[in-house]
C-alpha cells in the first residue's frame, strides 16, 4: 500500500472488514509510513522530557540528541529538583500506589492537599482530581449532560470534550468567533435544560487564546454556563500563571475550570475546579473518578511541589515568555505562517500532508524534534508542523531549530 494515497481516516471504519482484517490493512499503511520514513510517531526517549532529549532513532537504532520542540512540559517541572524530591518523599512514605478508588479508601491526605491547592490556584470553591486529563473532561461532561441538555462547543475543542458530549445534544460554533457563538446561543435559547458552552483556554493545535471574557458575557446574557479547559493555559498565561480567567481578569466568574496536570505542571492527571456542590456531585456520578484508582502518591507529591514552584519561581514563566517572543519573531521574520498562535504552541501551517511528512522527516534527520499534524487531526488545507517550546530552551537551542527550519522552509518552498 502506498501511504501517500491514504490517511488515518481511511482506517477508522473499513466497509465489510472485521476488526482483525481492518488491523491488517492498517498495518500495511503504517509499514509503508515507516518505509518512507514518514512515521514520526512513538519515537522513544531515553531520558524523558528535556529541551534537548536523547531519542533512539526508529530507523537506524542510533541515539540522537534532539532539540525537543514537542513537549507540553512548558516550565520543565518534570525535572525540577523540588518536584523530584517531593515525589520521592511521597513514594517512600505512602508506597507506589493509592491502593483503591478515591471513594473507597484510596483518598490520601496528599490528594486533599492537592485539591485545595488547585481550588485556590483557580479561584474556585473546590476541586476534584483525576488520574488523567482526558478522563477528567470526559467523565465530568458525561455525568453532567444528558438528552435534555446541550453542549455548545468551539469547533476546535479537545477530543476529550467531544467524547464527553456523546450522550447529549451538541452544537458547534466557528473557532473563537463570537458572532457564531451568539448565533448558536440565540437558536437554542429556551430549548434545553442545561446549556453549557465548552472551550479550551489555549487551543492545543493552534496556540491561540479563547475570548473567555466575551464568552462569559454571552453566556450570562443567554442563560448558559461556561466550562474552560485550561490544559495549555495553566502555568503559562495570566499574570501569575493561573490561566485564562486570570489573563482576562475574570477569576471566579467561570462556572467550571478544567485542566490537566500533565503539561506545565509536569506530571499526570486532571482536575475540575468549581462550586463545592458541583464537585460533591462529581464525587458520586463521574465514573472515571468513582471507578478508577486514585492518583499515585508520587504524582500527588510532585504536583503539590509543582504548584508551589509556579508560585515561588515566576522566573520560569518569564524565561518561557522570553523564548516565546524570540522564537515567534524569528519565525515570522523568516516568513512562516503561524496562524493565530499567541502562546508557547507554534503551528507552521503548510496545507499539504505530504510536505508536512517530508519536512518532519528532514527535521528529524537534522536532530530537530517536531510533530507532523495532518488530516484528519486537522483539515487537509491546514496540515501543519506543530512545535512547542519550554522555559529551559536556550537561545542556542532555538537558533539551531530556526536554522534547520529556514533550510527546510526554502527546500519545500513554504517561505
Ligand atoms: C486541551 C487538552 N485537554 C485535555 C487533554 C488531556 O489531558 P491528559 O493528557 O492529561 O489526559 C489534552 C492533552 O493531552 C489537551 O491538549
Image (cartoon, rainbow, N blue to C red):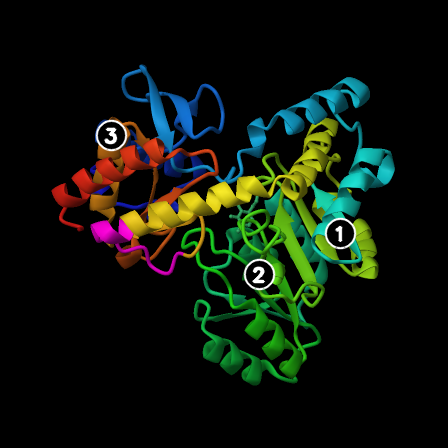
Front of the two marks 1 and 3: 1
Q: Position of residue 281 (x, y in %)?
A: 81, 57
Identify the residue at horizontal 56%, vertical 27% (top origin): 79
Q: Is residue 299 above or below residue 324?
A: above
Residue 275 in magenta stretch: no
Q: Name the residue under label 3.
A: 37
Who is closer to the viewer here, 347 or 8? 347
Who is closer to the viewer here, 293 or 327? 327
Identify the residue at horizontal 49%, vertical 40% (top origin): 72
Q: Name the residue under label 1.
A: 120
Work out which quarter of the rendered image holds the N terminus and state it: top left
Q: Mark 2 points at which residue?
A: 247
Main secondary-structure element of the magenta-colored stretch: loop
Question: Which span of residues is magenta-colored?
Answer: 331-341
Q: Position of residue 243 (x, y in %)?
A: 60, 55
Q: How far apart are marks 1 and 3 (CA)?
A: 47 Å
Q: In this view, does 128 lie above or below 104?
A: below
Indicate yes or no: mark 3 CB to ligand 1 under 8 Å. Answer: no
Q: Distance between the residues labelled 3 and 2?
A: 41 Å
Identify the residue at horizontal 48%, vertical 20% (top origin): 47
Q: In this view, does 176 lie to the left or right of 260?
A: left
Q: Which residue lies furthest to the top in this view?
A: 62
Instruction: Tell me which numbered mark, 3 or 2, is placed earlier along the sequence.
Output: 3
Query: Can residue 350 be seen?
Result: no
Front of the two marks 3 and 2: 2
Who is closer to the viewer here, 261 or 4? 261
Q: Where is residue 391 in the image (x, y as percent from the top left)?
A: 48, 38
Q: How far apart are marks 2 and 1 (CA)?
A: 16 Å
Query: Can residue 162 be seen?
Result: yes
Instruction: Tell me which numbered mark, 1 or 3, is placed earlier along the sequence.
Output: 3
Amino acid at each position: 500500500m502506498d501511504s501517500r494515497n491514504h490517511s488515518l481516516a481511511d482506517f477508522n471504519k473499513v466497509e465489510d472488514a472485521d476488526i482483525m482484517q481492518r488491523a491488517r490493512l492498517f498495518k500495511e499503511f503504517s509499514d509503508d509510513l515507516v518505509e518512507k520514513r514518514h512515521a514520526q510517531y512513538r519515537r522513544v526517549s531515553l531520558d524523558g522530557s528535556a529541551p534537548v532529549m536523547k531519542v533512539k532513532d526508529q530507523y537506524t537504532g542510533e541515539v540522537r540528541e534532539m532539540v525537543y520542540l514537542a513537549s507540553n512540559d512548558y516550565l520543565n517541572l518534570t525535572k525540577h529538583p523540588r518536584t523530584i524530591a517531593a515525589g520521592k518523599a511521597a513514594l517512600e512514605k505512602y508506597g507506589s500506589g493509592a491502593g483503591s478508588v478515591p471513594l473507597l479508601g484510596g483518598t490520601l491526605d496528599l490528594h486533599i492537599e492537592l485539591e485545595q491547592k488547585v481550588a485556590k490556584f483557580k479561584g474556585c470553591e473546590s476541586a476534584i482530581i483525576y488520574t488523567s486529563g482526558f478522563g477528567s473532561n470526559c467523565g465530568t461532561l458525561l455525568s453532567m449532560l444528558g438528552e435534555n441538555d446541550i453542549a455548545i462547543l468551539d469547533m476546535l475543542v479537545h477530543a476529550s470534550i467531544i467524547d464527553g458530549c456523546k450522550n447529549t445534544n451538541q452544537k458547534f460554533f466557528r473557532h473563537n468567533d463570537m458572532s457564531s457563538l451568539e448565533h448558536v446561543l440565540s437558536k437554542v435559547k429556551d430549548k434545553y435544560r442545561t446549556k453549557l458552552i465548552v472551550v479550551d483556554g489555549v487551543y492545543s493545535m493552534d496556540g491561540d487564546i479563547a475570548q473567555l471574557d466575551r464568552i462569559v458575557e454571552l453566556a450570562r446574557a443567554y442563560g448558559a454556563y461556561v466550562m474552560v479547559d485550561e490544559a495549555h493555559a495553566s502555568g503559562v498565561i495570566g499574570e501569575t500563571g493561573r490561566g485564562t480567567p486570570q489573563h482576562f481578569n475574570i477569576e471566579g466568574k467561570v462556572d467550571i475550570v478544567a485542566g490537566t496536570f500533565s503539561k506545565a505542571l509536569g506530571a499526570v492527571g486532571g482536575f475540575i475546579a468549581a462550586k463545592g456542590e458541583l464537585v460533591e456531585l462529581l464525587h458520586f456520578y463521574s465514573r472515571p473518578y468513582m471507578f478508577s484508582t486514585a492518583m499515585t502518591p508520587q504524582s500527588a507529591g510532585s504536583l503539590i511541589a509543582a504548584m508551589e514552584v509556579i508560585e515561588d519561581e515566576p522566573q520560569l514563566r518569564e524565561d518561557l515568555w522570553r523564548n516565546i517572543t524570540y522564537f515567534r519573531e524569528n519565525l515570522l521574520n523568516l516568513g512562516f505562517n503561524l496562524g493565530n498562535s499567541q502562546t508557547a504552541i507554534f503551528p507552521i501551517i503548510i496545507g499539504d500532508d505530504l510536505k508536512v511528512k517530508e519536512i518532519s522527516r528532514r527535521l528529524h534527520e537534522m536532530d530537530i524534534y517536531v510533530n507532523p499534524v495532518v488530516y484528519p487531526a486537522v483539515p487537509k488545507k491546514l496540515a501543519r508542523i506543530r512545535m512547542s517550546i519550554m522555559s529551559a530552551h536556550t537561545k542556542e537551542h532555538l537558533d539551531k531549530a530556526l536554522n534547520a527550519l529556514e533550510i527546510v522552509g526554502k527546500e519545500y518552498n513554504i517561505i
